[in-house]
């Protein structure tokens, strides 16, 4: 099949690369000329495991190309995925202006039959507006359209795996005029057993926001329980283990810590609350989920303050800058908020992250960026673990102790063993344990 992917950010680039990888011919479109040029020169602008290799192979084999001219992609492909950004506006609702612009452009240049698939995370009823915009702006043309919603469930850090081995494929449609088959089902034998759910458009759109909001709810729930665990001498990790053994609950997303970040969970949660308001439905549970999450940053900084007494003048090693491991994405990363608070209080911050330093250097002034974790720990009064990179799980405790001015670790991701740390003479403090 010939597939056009409009918008090659995180979702679009992974989508384009994976569709090409499984044998389709893909045109990736983006109006960011510099990004397109970099991609054409073989440079991948984000870090995502294996993405560079998959792109390089598909480009070399002539199945993947990039352009800034949307008309080239639209004219040559029958299926067009819309993957442009939907960033939050001031009050949290999604900015859909890029989606509208792309749909108008498609309507202006398309000929023949096209299937337009919305993959960007969008509020419910966007599909309706996409369809309407195509009809309104395509009046002069000869094109005929089908519109579908196909929400993505890609996790950064394992996006390729998630795309090629999905746990479900959701398609929202009102009425399909053409005949299409699912490329993932066709090309990946393992995908034969993947649940394939066809719903109407509104349900598919809600599935995306409801899924991310539910994941966020699990995290805030366990963070709330963590606070109680601390008061009564329980260990939240064991509590999560015990709860998770019930298949109705499940262990995933019950890791207590500094809270959720990234460009999906916080923004989708906020957008969902706004969608509820717009339709006269108070999603108050989700407002609380958001409030608990925002508070986790304060909980974490308080832990440092309780142990350091005075933060001003102290040197704090921040381990981790990305919002989660295996990505260089720092958008809405808890690390940035923690660092902002520490700097405001007069601390000296030394930071290290295996992948996110280049991006962090653009947004963080007054931070000393270090070559490795031990360099960051050198002379520090405390270490703040903010991202659960494997590299931090393997830290050598005796070297940590020897490097630090005061061996104090505040572990915002509960990745180290409290007993082991304490037995080695390291003052250790996790979340809810
Ligand atoms: C999320 C969804 O998981 C994915 O399905 C969707 O399509 C895009 O949004 P992603 O943003 O990559 O994916 O990150 P995710 O793995 O969901 O983690 C989000 C945040 O929650 C991270 O900051 C992570 O550290 C935190 N988290 C996750 C916890 O604090 N505790 C947990 O138990 C799990």
Image: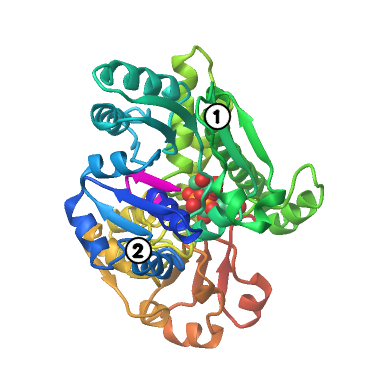
Residue bounds of the magenta highlight: 1-10
Residue 433: which quarter of the image? Answer: bottom right
Specify the quadrant of the image occupied by residue 140.
top left
Q: Position of residue 168 (x, y in %)?
A: 64, 44
In the rendered structure, the answer to whether residue 263 lies left or right of residue 303 reads: left
Question: Which residue is drawn at the image coordinates 60% and 71% (left, top)?
Answer: 416
**Furthest residue toward right:** 246
Look at the numbered disc 2 and give the secondary structure of its residue: loop
Task: Report x, y in % for residue 177.
Answer: 50, 24
Give whichever of 46, 22 is nearer the camera: 22
- Label 2 beta carbon less than 8 Å to ligand 1: no
Q: Can residue 257 be seen in this view?
A: no
Depicted 119 relative to depicted 63: above or below: above
Q: Quadrant of residue 396?
A: bottom right
| Residue appearing at x 55%, y 39% in the figure | 212
Q: Nearer the viewer, residue 13 or 135?
A: 135
Whether residue 190 can be seen here: yes
Image disc number at residue 172: 1
Q: Mark 2 points at which residue?
A: 62
Where residue 246 sits in the image (x, y, percent)? 82, 47
Answer whether residue 2 is magenta in the image.
yes
Question: Of label 1 and label 2, which has the lower sequence position?
Answer: 2
């Amino acid at each position: 099949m010939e597939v056009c992917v409009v918008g090659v950010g995180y979702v679009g680039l992974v989508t384009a690369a994976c569709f090409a990888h499984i044998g389709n011919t893909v045109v990736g479109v983006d109006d960011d000329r510099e990004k397109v040029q970099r991609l054409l020169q073989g440079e991948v602008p984000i870090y995502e495991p294996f993405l560079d290799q998959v792109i390089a192979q598909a480009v070399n084999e002539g199945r993947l190309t990039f352009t800034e001219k949307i008309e080239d992609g639209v004219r040559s492909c029958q299926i067009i995925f819309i993957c442009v950004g939907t960033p939050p506006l001031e009050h949290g609702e999604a900015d859909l202006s890029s989606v509208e612009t792309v749909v108008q452009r498609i309507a202006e240049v398309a000929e023949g039959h096209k299937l337009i698939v919305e993959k960007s995370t969008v509020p419910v009823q966007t599909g309706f507006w996409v369809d309407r915009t195509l009809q309104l702006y395509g009046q002069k043309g000869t094109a005929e359209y089908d519109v579908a919603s196909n929400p993505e469930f890609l996790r950064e850090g394992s996006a390729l795996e998630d795309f090629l081995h999905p746990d479900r494929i959701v398609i929202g449609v009102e009425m399909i005029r053409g005949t299409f088959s699912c490329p993932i089902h066709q090309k990946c034998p393992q995908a034969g057993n993947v649940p394939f759910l066809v719903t109407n458009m509104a349900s598919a759109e809600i599935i995306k926001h409801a899924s991310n909001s539910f994941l966020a709810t699990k995290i805030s729930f366990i963070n709330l329980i963590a606070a109680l665990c601390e008061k009564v001498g329980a260990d939240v990790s064991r509590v999560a283990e015990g709860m998770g053994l019930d298949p109705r609950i499940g262990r995933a997303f019950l890791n207590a810590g500094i809270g959720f970040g990234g460009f999906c969970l916080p923004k989708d949660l906020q957008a969902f609350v706004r969608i509820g308001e717009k339709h006269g439905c108070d999603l108050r549970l989700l407002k609380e989920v958001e409030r608990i999450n925002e508070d986790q940053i304060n909980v974490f900084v308080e832990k440092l303050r309780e142990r350091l007494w005075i933060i001003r003048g102290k040197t704090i090693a921040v381990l981790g800058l990305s919002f989660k491991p295996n990505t260089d994405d720092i958008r809405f990363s808890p690390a940035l908020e923690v660092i902002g608070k520490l700097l405001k209080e007069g601390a000296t911050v030394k930071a290290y992250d295996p992948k996110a330093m280049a991006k962090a250097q653009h947004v963080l002034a007054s931070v000393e960026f270090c070559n490795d974790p031990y360099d960051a720990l050198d002379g520090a009064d405390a270490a703040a673990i903010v991202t659960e990179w494997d590299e931090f799980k393997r830290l050598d405790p005796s070297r940590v102790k020897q490097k630090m001015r005061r061996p104090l670790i505040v572990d915002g991701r509960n990745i180290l063993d409290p007993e082991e740390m304490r037995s080695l003479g390291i003052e250790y403090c996790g979340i809810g344990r």
